[in-house]
Image: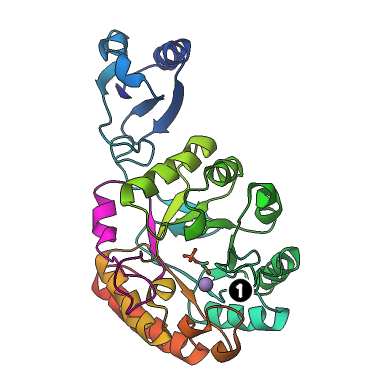
Amino acid sequence: MIIEMKTSASEKEIQAVLNKIKALGFEVQLNNGKEHIVIAVLGSDTGDVDTQVFEAFSGVEQVLRIQKPFKLASLDFKKERTKIQIGDVEIGGKEIAIMAGPCSVESEEQLISCAKIAKANGAQFLRGGAFKPRSSPFAFQGLEEEGLKILAKARDATGLLIVTEVVSPEEVNLVAGYADVLQIGARNMQNYRLLEAVGKAKRPVLLKRGLSSTIEEWLMAADYILRGNGDPNVILCHRGIRTFDNSTRFTYDVGSIPVLRRLTHLPIITDPSHAAGKFYLVPDFAKMAIAGGTDGLIMEIHPDPQNAVSDGAQSLTFSDFSRTMKELKTLAAAVGRKI
Ligand code: PEP
Ligand code: MN
């Protein structure tokens, strides 16, 4: 249930409504919108409470039920698109954010070379996994804290912001100590204890869509994080889903971008690399996302893809990345965006 307060509502009137919500045993979240304050009443049995309970309070404009199973991520709760400020970069505005880097942090030399190319071509973020959620337990699992230290060195050397994955609740504080954005991988989208833990860390979260999750499930996962952090700082990351078709690594559901726009205020970024699975598809996949309205791209690059420890087949060489970025800049301008 959401309660829209009148523009003229006083602090005292707002507080009276909040007290009532708490007295009824519900959770509360506030959206301090441009026009008015919206209060979300959250709980499994808000349906049992009559909207009149709140309509009776002075300062209340209207009381509505959120029909969707996701609440804080929904456009009902917050109508203006969310823009997330990270350092000097805003995600969700006119500018398309670019995140680039290797799948895994392998060495200082490898990462710094990626960082320099990313920076030179207009990226604002350096990606790279230090903790890797691999499908096989025998595959490379990441350099862990050593990888985080290398990421921090690359940030110092280039000024790029760092986006890196966290795979367990116990490691959230460690990773948040180095990262500017915490990545939740597709395999962990429904790891609810992990979502709660990143919700408590004061860092924006990049939430990838689960391999076989519906958009509703994805937005409910976002609610887990939003519930904890109070600020709407979740970035959804569209990265392809599993279907019967295996001609690409994942099916590139680029249509999910305009679908999400009608459901959520959260910014959306796109990962063409993991969907494509093949480097030669990545540039066209990236272009489709820009045409579809994405707020950013996260792409894998590598100095020597053939010898990468993970995801070499989908990693762009530096020269392919530079060429792709030039093309993306032209396309972004054509659709009224900027890279
Ligand atoms: C990654 O970004 O390297 C990764 C593991 O991606 P995903 O979680 O989308 O598979
Ligand atoms: Mn990868």
Q: What amino acid type should be assigned to the residue bearing mark 1? A: Ser
For the point 56% across and 84% down, the residue is: 302
In the rendered image, residue 305, in percent from the top left (x then y), is placed at 55, 88
Q: Is mark 1 within 8 Å of ligand 2?
A: yes
Task: Let me know if residue 260 is in the magenta part.
Answer: yes
The residue at the point 45 percent across, 15 percent down is: 15
| Magenta segment, prevailing SS (helix, strand or loop) | loop
From what the image shows, is residue 239 above or below residue 188?
Answer: below
Residue 119 versus residue 71: which sits nearer the camera? 71
240 or 265, nearer to the observer: 240
Q: Position of residue 57 (x, y in %)?
A: 32, 9
User: What is the number of callouts on the image?
Assistant: 1
Image color mode: rainbow
- In the image, taking residue 180 as reference, residue 107 lies left or right, namely right
For disc 1, the marked residue is 104
For the magenta stretch, what is the residue range?
242-271
Q: Which image quarter: residue 40?
A: top left
Verify whether residue 244 appears in magenta: yes
Residue 303 at what x, y percent from top left?
Answer: 58, 88
Percent of width and height locating residue 235: 44, 54
Residue 161, relative to residue 172: is it above or below?
Answer: below
Above or below — where is 31 with respect to 132? above
- In the rendered image, the quadrant that contains the C terminus is bottom left
Relative to 149, residue 310 above or below: below
